Image (tube, grey):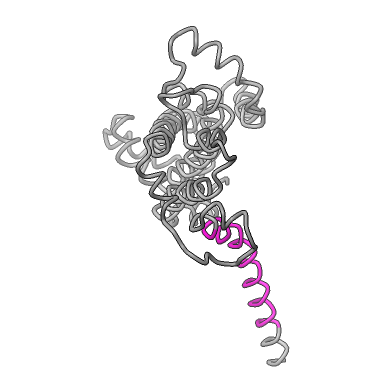
Amino acid sequence: MAAVAESKGRGSTIIMVLYLLFLMLPIYWLLNMSLKTNNEILGAFSLWPKNPTLANYRTILTDPSWYMGYVNSLTYVVMNTAISITVALPAAYAFSRYRFLGDKHLFFWLLTNRMAPAAVFALPFFQLYSSIGLFDTHIAVALAHCLFNVPLAVWILEGFMSGVPREIDETAYIDGYSFPRFFVRIFMPLIASGIGVAAFFCFMFSWVELLLSRTLTSVDAKPIAATMTRTVSASGLDWGVLAAAGMLTIIPGALVIWFVRNYIAKGFALGRV
């Protein structure tokens, strides 16, 4: 029996290692390309750079047309995350604590917004923002992404809030807490894991979304993803610079995951994710 159990353990370890290698292969290949010149990339096949260079990263960090793409992306993503969580918190509280006519239908309707393709809303948003002077601004993209991220945040937070006993609300009111004070000082710390999970998903979906951010911007607020798709030199695509941009694009998401990793773990265990 011990030999069988040990054999199964080794088999599971091997499978897990192979799976991790499979997941890491695209990232390694992106890093490999980012350290090569275009000639080496388009030349003979190699598993690692023969003459590693940081010139591609130097181009991105010194050229405003590149590094401003990261600044623009981070600006509207942070704005969207803050707006989405701020709007979703009271909405999720209402769905979790009160019953009103059409509440379940309204809750389902919120989710249908998340199911709709972004292409459906690209033209209406473009016309609306062009007419009111919001085109090519960070707030335009942040508000557009709220259409998808607010329903997602409401859905996640409602699951966490429903798990908090109603008696806590009643006890706080008996103790003389006003609703804003109770919500900020007592209730929000109880659902901190849910807020962390919702913020993570809002950040992630806003960071990787391309269609709306590309349609609603041109120069001043153009994100890095749009910059990458529009980069063509006289000799064709600059593969090394694009690979370096891709590596730098992974970093913000990885940092967010690192800082909220404990909340994400609790969220998958306790909340509606």
From this view, report whether residue 69 is shown above or below residue 122. Answer: below
Q: Identify the residue at image location x=39%, y=39%.
A: 67
Which residue in the rendered view is the most extreme toward the left?
A: 176
Could you tell me residue 188's position as x and y percent?
A: 37, 41
Say which quadrant the N terminus sits in. Answer: bottom right
Could you tell me residue 207's position as x and y percent?
A: 49, 39
Report the label total: 0
Could you tell me residue 38's position as x and y percent?
A: 55, 51
Could you tell me residue 260's position as x and y percent?
A: 42, 52
Closer-to-camera residue (261/239) = 239
Would residue 4 appear left or right of 158 to someone viewing this image? right
Residue 29 highlighted magenta (yes or no):
yes
Question: Which region is colored magenta?
Answer: 8-32
Residue 152 highlighted magenta (yes or no):
no
Q: Identify the residue at image location x=67%, y=87%.
A: 6
Image quarter for residue 106?
A: top right
Would residue 44 appear left or right of 138 to someone viewing this image? right
From this view, report whether residue 6 is shown above or below residue 78. Answer: below
Image quarter for residue 114?
A: top right
**Main secondary structure type of the part rendered in magenta:** helix
Q: Is residue 89 visible in the rendered structure shown here?
A: no
Would residue 12 appear left or right of 133 to someone viewing this image? right
From this view, report whether residue 203 is shown above or below residue 178. Answer: below
Closer-to-camera residue (124/151) = 124
Q: Is residue 166 visible in the rendered structure shown here?
A: yes
Q: Identify the residue at image location x=58%, y=62%.
A: 24
Closer-to-camera residue (84/103) = 84
Q: Identify the residue at image location x=46%, y=53%.
A: 254
